[in-house]
Amino acid sequence: MITPTQKLSLGSRQLDDMLGGGLVKGSAVLVSGAPGVGKTTFGLQFLTAGFKAGQRGLLVSFEEFPASLIRDAQQLGWDLKTMEQRGDLGIIFTSPQVFLESLKQQSGPIAEKIQALKPDRMVLDSVAHFQQFTQNSIELREIYNILINAVKRQDITALLLDEAANILQAQGKPVAALPFLVDAVILLRYVEVDSSMKRAMAVMKMRGSNHQKEIRSFEIKPGGLVLGPPFTGQAGILSGMSHRIA
Ligand SMILES: Nc1ncnc2c1ncn2[C@@H]1O[C@H](COP(=O)(O)OP(=O)(O)OP(=O)(O)O)[C@@H](O)[C@H]1O
Ligand SMILES: [Mg+2]
């Protein structure tokens, strides 16, 4: 008998539908996007949807202090402080070096915190910091493998946030390895449509899932990302410079 794949909700019916029912349990998902497009918000939405489903979450941040994350989340209607006090959320603010070392050794305070929390969901903000370690694409691939294997070993569904203005530009650089290694890739982009900036989302790949192929507009509102209609009658959306088609 084939066991149905367990999917994890993003807390929004529209988002779940776009992702073919949610994120596949135990998968590593790359969320790639430009500065300020909504990567951290998407990550927080994923974690808070988990709390509603009785799942624990871990937020690993290399850039934003926990206090500022908690404050920004509050603006969006999410009470991270209470979740942390309840033991549903763990926030780790560290350097990429220390975090990677703890994954390699599988010991030390960070590893112990993860083992004690036993998170179902994890957000890493952001994997872009690992790129500073090396220019060598084989070494970088090894670092990504350590990360992905660590989350898979613990059956954690992980959102790996990445900074990329345009994933197409990443080709030829070592960063290009990550989209191949992960199970799913979600692109968050800014696009210029009719002289205004809009946010767009596309699912580039999702192993083992029949996700939607449309490029959808989205807005950030209290409660998280709200999907709008697909960009109809426009081409070139993923290049950031759209143009009308007949
Ligand atoms: N309460 C809010 N209501 C509406 N929009 C908001 C709210 N809070 C944040 N935003 C929007 O979300 C954007 C920032 O989102 P977020 O921090 O998730 O982006 P990011 O991709 O993680 O950015 P960075 O690359 O700086 O890490 C802001 O620039 C703003 O446009
Ligand atoms: Mg961010």
Image (cartoon, rainbow, N blue to C red):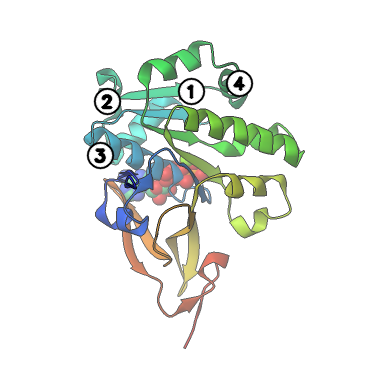
| Residue designated by label 3 | 77
Q: CA distance from mark 3 to mark 4?
A: 36 Å
Amino acid type of the residue tagged 2 in the rendering: Met
**Sequence-first disc among 3 and 4:** 3
**Does residue 204 show up?**
yes
Q: Which residue is mark 4?
A: 104
The spot of residue 79 in percent (x, y) is 26, 31
Q: Position of 186 compared to 172: left or right?
A: left
Q: Secondary structure at mark 2?
A: helix
Q: Determine which residue is flagged by label 2.
A: 83
Please state which amino acid type lies under the numbered disc 1: Phe
Q: Which one is in front in this view, the residue at disc 3 or the one at disc 4? A: 4
- Left or right, 77 with reference to 137: left
Above or below 32: residue 132: above
**Of all residues shown, which one is farthest toward the bottom?**
246
Query: For the residue labelled by badge 3, is the local secondary structure a helix, a strand or a loop?
Result: loop
Q: Which residue is mark 1?
A: 93
- The amino acid on which the numbered mark 4 sits, given as a three-letter code, is Lys
User: Where is residue 114, by image quadrant?
Assistant: top left
Question: Does label 2 or label 4 sit earlier along the sequence?
Answer: 2
Q: Nearer the viewer, residue 197 or 86?
A: 86
Rounded to the nearest angstrom, the CA distance separating label 2 from label 4 is 28 Å
Q: Earlier in the sequence, mark 2 or mark 1?
A: 2
The residues tagged by marks 2 and 1 sit, at their Cα atoms, a distance apart of 16 Å
- Place of residue 139 in the rendered image (x, y in percent of width and height, measured from the top left): 73, 34
Q: Are marks 3 and 2 in contact (CB under 8 Å)?
A: no
Q: Which label lies toward us, 3 or 1?
A: 1
Decide which of tag 3 and tag 1 comes sooner along the chain.
Answer: 3
